[in-house]
Amino acid sequence: MTFISSQQVTWAGEPQYISDLVERVLIAHPHYRKVVREDRQIYVRYRPPGWPMVLESAFQIDVEQAEQGSSRAKVTLISQKFVAGDMFDRAPVLIGAVFEVILRYWDAEYRSAHPNSH
């Protein structure tokens, strides 16, 4: 049985820009491995240092158009088949960590491209 959990967030920027940013950020981050992109869908595996491969987590990130000039990114955590549930309530923390990494880079890029916006 597989455990699935997801959250979404909206950022300023067209879907192609947000997809490019997400892919770039995750490829550059050492804890995210096997980043594969298919158009605006990104698949990634997460394993912090010291974790055995058996505890690796898979994420699917879907980026779609939201309101004009913004995109919605939905991050879905997909457990390995033998994990039946989120015993330690870690799914929101792991998904939040993905958003945090992306948001840090998005914020820096967006602020440098739009210096008068807050």
Image (cartoon, rainbow, N blue to C red):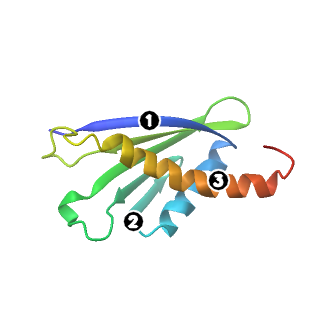
Marks 3/2 in contact by CB < 8 Å: the verdict is no
The quadrant in which residue 31 appears is: bottom left
What's the amino acid at mark 1?
Gln
Residue 20 appears anywhere in the view? no
Give whichever of discs 1 and 3 has the lower sequence position: 1
Q: Which mark is residue 7?
A: 1
Give whichever of discs 3 and 2 has the lower sequence position: 2
Q: Where is residue 83 shown, x and y percent of the image?
A: 16, 44
Q: Secondary structure at mark 3?
A: helix
Q: At 51% across and 69% down in the image, what residue appears? A: 28
What's the amino acid at mark 2?
His
Residue 83 appears anywhere in the view? yes
Q: Nearer the viewer, residue 103 or 35?
A: 103
Mark 2 closeness class: few <14, some 14–19, many ≥20 residues within 10 Å: few
Give whichever of discs 2 and 1 has the lower sequence position: 1
Q: Where is residue 79 shown, x and y percent of the image?
A: 24, 46
Q: Secondary structure at mark 2?
A: loop
Q: Nearer the viewer, residue 18 or 110?
A: 110
Residue position for label 3:
106
How far apart are labels 1 and 3 at the CA level?
A: 18 Å
Q: Of all residues shown, which one is farthest toward the right? A: 116
Check the picture and name the quadrant holding the N terminus: top left
Q: Where is residue 105 shown, x and y percent of the image?
A: 62, 58
Q: Secondary structure at mark 1?
A: strand
Residue position for label 2:
31
What's the amino acid at mark 3?
Trp
Q: At 71% across and 57% down in the image, what residue appears? A: 109
